[in-house]
Image: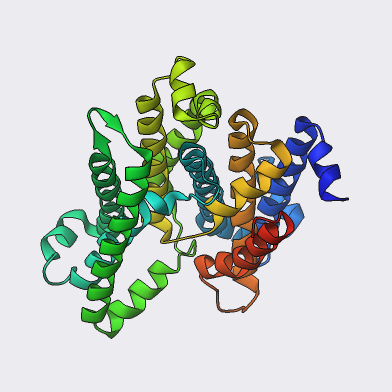
Amino acid sequence: MHAEDVRRLPAPVSYAVLLIILLGAALLALSSGAYPVAIDDLLRMFTGNTPDDPTAELVLWDIRIPRLLLGLLTGAVLAVSGALLQGLFRNPLADPGLIGVSSGAALAAVAVIVLGGSGLAGWSALAGRWALPLAAFIGGSVTTLLAWRIARRQGQTSVALLLLAGIAINAIAGAGTGLLTFYADDNALRSLTFWTMGSLAHARWEDLWLAGPWMLVTLIVAPLLARPLDAFLLGEPVAGHMGYSTDWVKRGAIVLAALGVGAAVAVTGLIGFVGLVIPHLLRQIFGAGHRLLLPACALGGGALLVLADCLARVIVAPAELPIGLMMALLGGPFFLMLLMRNRFV
């Protein structure tokens, strides 16, 4: 099927295709891995019956299901946040990293890893096992708030200033992360290297209870911004003339992206490309209107991250590639191909 044929598909058919891909990815994620689980056992368990293999039930409930749910939520929230910010900035190259949330979360997480036994020992003792994810969430929120405050002029938020402030904060946070990396010992260096490459390997139910509600808020509330963001595509003054409070639209998009991405990064580490590639790809199919695009991004982002996680688990088995590295390997060439096909370069 050619790209033009895909674009002509009715939206319900395209949604159905995305849903089938998502369900297929979920089934693959639950059944494959170091301990294969038979499809029959999967069906028995989800229909309330006891699987033939009792170990399979333990593997599914303790490891596979929380990992699958975290992957679905993380992929969905990264893609939806990317679509929100691309609509806000009216720039198809915008992604959640532009407002400083990822770099701020990384700086705070690396600070806990490197200084958790010395300068931040009090924080580590107070927060316990949540010290790193909570610090990452707070770090991402603080840098986003700082960028937003810098962009405020005469009671309005300047999108251009927000973009420039995000670039400057990313540079400063990157320098701070580099300094801490230079200071780190061998053990801390290994930990922070794996964290910055992102992973779903340590997903637990506790991570979902901690980060899931924030990500769900982003996914549930984001569609309310669909019509204002469509108006933004015509220009901020036009959106204002159409009756939308442009400043509240900016605040809403930034807060939702910061909440969702901050929560995701806090428990998975840094995962790139989902927020950039998925909105781009699905805009080719669903068009630029956010009413159709945002739900499609949630489905497509979740499916992509779960499929990438499946590949990351088997491609160098019994070891496991960090999913951030996997996304870079998949997303980089794909995005380059997409750009060349659409003559954006």
Q: Residue furthest bottom?
A: 186
Foreground residue among 281 and 200: 281
Compared with 73, 216 (above or below) is: above
Foreground residue among 69 and 160: 160
Q: In this view, does 250 lie to the left or right of 314?
A: left
Residue at x-position 77% and y-position 42%: 17
Compared with 190, 31 (above or below) is: above
Total marks in image? 0
Q: Is residue 344 left or right of residue 136?
A: right
Q: Position of residue 277 (x, y in %)?
A: 60, 54
The C terminus - image quarter: bottom right
Compared with 214, 189 (above or below) is: below
Q: Which residue lies furthest to the right in this view?
A: 1
Is residue 135 visible in this depiction of the protein? yes
Q: Is residue 177 left or right of residue 58?
A: left
Residue at x-position 27% and y-position 52%: 134
Is residue 210 visible in this depiction of the protein? no
Q: Where is residue 194 in the image (x, y as percent from the top left)?
A: 41, 72
Q: Where is residue 161 in the image (x, y as percent from the top left)?
A: 32, 44
Residue at x-position 24% and y-position 34%: 153
Residue at x-position 50% and y-position 24%: 228
Within the image, what quadrant is residue 196 found in?
bottom left
Q: Where is residue 205 in the image (x, y as percent from the top left)?
A: 44, 50
